[in-house]
């Protein structure tokens, strides 16, 4: 107590409240009592102030627990509850493409020599997507992605993903089908402006439910689900602006992908490989050849080139001169399977897959039914090298030195890419049936039976949000061309050269 009084007296003297002589002269009892009373009063005030600070700190802590966290950065804009269990984020993506066909030999979709129209150069707003995503109760994720690009409005993604734990999660809604490794890659992460020829066979977005998760301490990812079922290479909205199920049956899809060395330093750390498959029974609109079938009525696909995006194969959809009253349609089982892999090591990356599809197809001529199983397969391999030393990966690179023209520092990340892909259609699609009836499912004078393409490109990532891309692809075809000057002879469709550019911003 004596020590405490000395400290308070020293503070009083130091602050000028009392003087040293006053203390020295406080020898008689009256002055000593007055000084003692003053010290006690000040001591009480100090206690009150200390308690008030404690109360203020408690109030601030309580307020902090209830105050949402607002964020704005190059990763997007968001608001999150103080406990982190509820979050809403606003993101976006814009892609503006340019497409040029040098040489003038590229033929527009579906054309033959008799009415050939060359593909047109031009610009395209490929994507304009405001993206809304978030989390509720710390485990229920949701994603809504409308797209206003390419002159139409569609919903690309709309799903809820319940993440009960790492190994058991349930996703319901419109989502990417768990199948192709290149299809599952983010739309902003693919190394070329368009995906390879394999994507003509791999399903895109579909509506359904899947369970998925990670096993073996995150070394194995699995997915399995039931979906409406979409045409090869397509989404549920591919032919209309509404998401409709044009088939009464459902598709079953499953995928397993392993990265067994990702926790082990070494040259195999970036290796991943897996297998995916789908199975379903598909029935199109059989019409006995009396009317024209569209693709979403027949439930049969058509195939396009990669960067050029020009149709080079399609099944018969209407009456022709040589083969009257015929239109092919899906009529039975459809099976897909795909082994796939990627490998990343420092600035080098490699991605590849093989896709095979078997589809039961039917057509009628004069009420006679012709049926067969048509097989198609495709494969691709894509290589990438980051010249500026960043690490390659399945997503976009983490740019070490963002481009800053004002400061004159940084050149972003520069990437060289190369790709080879090919697609082959079963010869049975073109084989004549019915003797003199001359029936086949695809017209060899209009549809090529295979395509091979190689592509090269360069990507400039100015920062994590902005990307410029330049690519060139040459695609060669087998069959699919019948110049009128040589009658019914089938020749090879002219090779297609395509140069594409892209300005992309995403956050």
Image (cartoon, rainbow, N blue to C red):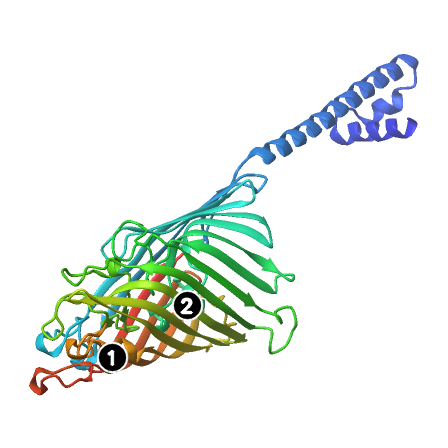
Going 55% across and 35% down the picture, which residue do you hit?
Answer: 67
Residue 409 seen anywhere in this rendered image of the structure: no
Please give the name of the residue rendered at 30% of the width and 73% of the height, measured from the top-left corner. Answer: 306
In the rendered image of this protein, does residue 185 appear above or below residue 237? below
Per the model, the C-alpha gap separating discs 1 and 2 is 23 Å
Q: Which of the 4 image quarters holds residue 302?
A: bottom left
Work out whether 471 lies above or below 219. Answer: below
Q: Say which of marks 1 and 2 sits in front.
A: 1
Residue occupying the point 30% across, 63% down: 331
Quarter containing the C terminus: bottom left
Residue 343 position within the rendered picture, expressed as x and y whole percent measured from the top left: 52, 75
The answer to whether residue 374 is above or below residue 239 is below
Q: Are marks 1 and 2 in contact (CB under 8 Å)?
A: no
Task: From the top left corner, tell me how far across and down residue 132 is, in percent.
Answer: 41, 47
Where does residue 274 sit, x and y in percent of width and height? 52, 70
Judge by depth and name the residue closer to the eye, 407 or 363. Answer: 363
Mark 2 closeness class: few <14, some 14–19, many ≥20 residues within 10 Å: many
Residue 237 left/right relative to 37: left
Q: Mark 1 points at which residue?
A: 431
Q: Residue 487 carries which label?
A: none
Question: Which residue is the site of mark 2?
Answer: 336
Answer with the quarter of the image where residue 113 lies: bottom left
Q: In which quarter of the image is the N terminus?
A: top right
**Of marks 1 and 2, which one's residue comes earlier in the chain?**
2
Q: Is mark 2 on a helix, strand or loop?
A: strand
Asked whether the viewer can see residue 368, the reply is yes
Q: Which residue is drawn at 90% across and 30% down?
A: 3
Judged left or right of residue 20, residue 339 is: left
Label 1 CA crowd tier, 10 Å (few <14, some 14–19, many 20+): some
């Amino acid at each position: 107590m004596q020590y405490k009084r000395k400290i308070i007296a020293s503070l009083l003297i130091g602050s000028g409240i009392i003087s040293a002589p006053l203390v020295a002269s406080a020898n008689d009892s009256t002055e000593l009592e007055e000084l003692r009373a003053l010290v006690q009063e000040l001591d009480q005030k100090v206690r009150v102030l200390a308690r008030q600070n404690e109360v203020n700190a408690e109030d601030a802590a309580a307020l902090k627990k209830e105050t949402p966290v607002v964020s704005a950065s190059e990763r997007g804009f968001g608001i999150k509850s103080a406990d982190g269990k509820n979050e809403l984020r606003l993101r976006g993506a814009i892609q503006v493409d340019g497409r040029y066909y040098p040489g003038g030999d590229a033929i527009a979709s579906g054309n033959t020599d008799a009415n050939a129209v060359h593909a047109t150069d031009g610009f395209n707003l490929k994507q304009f997507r405001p993206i809304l995503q978030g989390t509720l109760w710390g485990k229920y994720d949701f994603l809504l992605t409308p797209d206003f690009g390419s002159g139409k409005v569609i919903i690309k993604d709309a799903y809820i993903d319940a993440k009960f734990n790492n190994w058991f999660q349930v996703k319901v809604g419109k989502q990417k089908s768990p199948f192709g490794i290149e299809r599952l890659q983010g739309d902003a992460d693919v190394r070329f402006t368009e995906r390879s020829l394999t994507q003509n066979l791999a399903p895109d977005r579909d509506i359904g439910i899947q369970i998925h998760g990670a096993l073996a301490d995150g070394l194995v990812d699995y997915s399995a689900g039931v979906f409406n079922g979409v045409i090869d290479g397509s989404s549920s909205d591919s032919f209309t602006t509404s998401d409709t199920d044009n088939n009464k049956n459902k598709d079953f899809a499953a995928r397993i992908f392993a990265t067994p060395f990702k926790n082990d330093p070494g040259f195999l750390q970036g290796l991943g490989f897996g297998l995916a498959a789908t199975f379903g029974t598909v029935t199109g609109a059989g019409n006995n050849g009396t009317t024209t079938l569209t693709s979403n009525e027949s439930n049969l696909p058509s195939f396009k080139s990669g960067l050029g995006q020009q149709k080079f194969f399609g099944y018969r959809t209407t009456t022709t001169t040589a083969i009257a009253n015929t239109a092919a349609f899906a009529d039975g089982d459809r099976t897909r399977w795909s082994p796939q892999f990627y490998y990343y090591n420092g600035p080098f990356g490699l991605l590849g897959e093989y896709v095979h599809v078997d589809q039961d197809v039917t057509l009628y001529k004069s009420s006679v039914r012709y049926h067969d199983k048509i097989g198609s397969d495709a494969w691709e391999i894509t290589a990438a090298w980051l010249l500026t030393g960043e690490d390659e990966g399945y997503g976009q690179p983490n740019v070490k030195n963002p481009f800053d023209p004002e400061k004159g520092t940084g050149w972003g990340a520069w990437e060289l890419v190369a790709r080879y892909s090919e697609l082959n259609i079963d010869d049975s699609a073109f084989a004549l049936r019915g003797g003199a009836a001359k029936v086949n499912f695809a017209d060899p004078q209009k549809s090529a039976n295979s395509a091979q393409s190689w592509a090269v490109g360069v990507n400039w990532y100015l920062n994590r949000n902005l990307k410029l891309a330049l690519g060139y692809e040459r695609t060669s075809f087998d069959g699919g061309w019948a110049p009128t000057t040589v009658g019914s002879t089938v020749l090879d469709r002219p090779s297609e050269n395509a140069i594409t550019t892209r300005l992309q911003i995403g956050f």
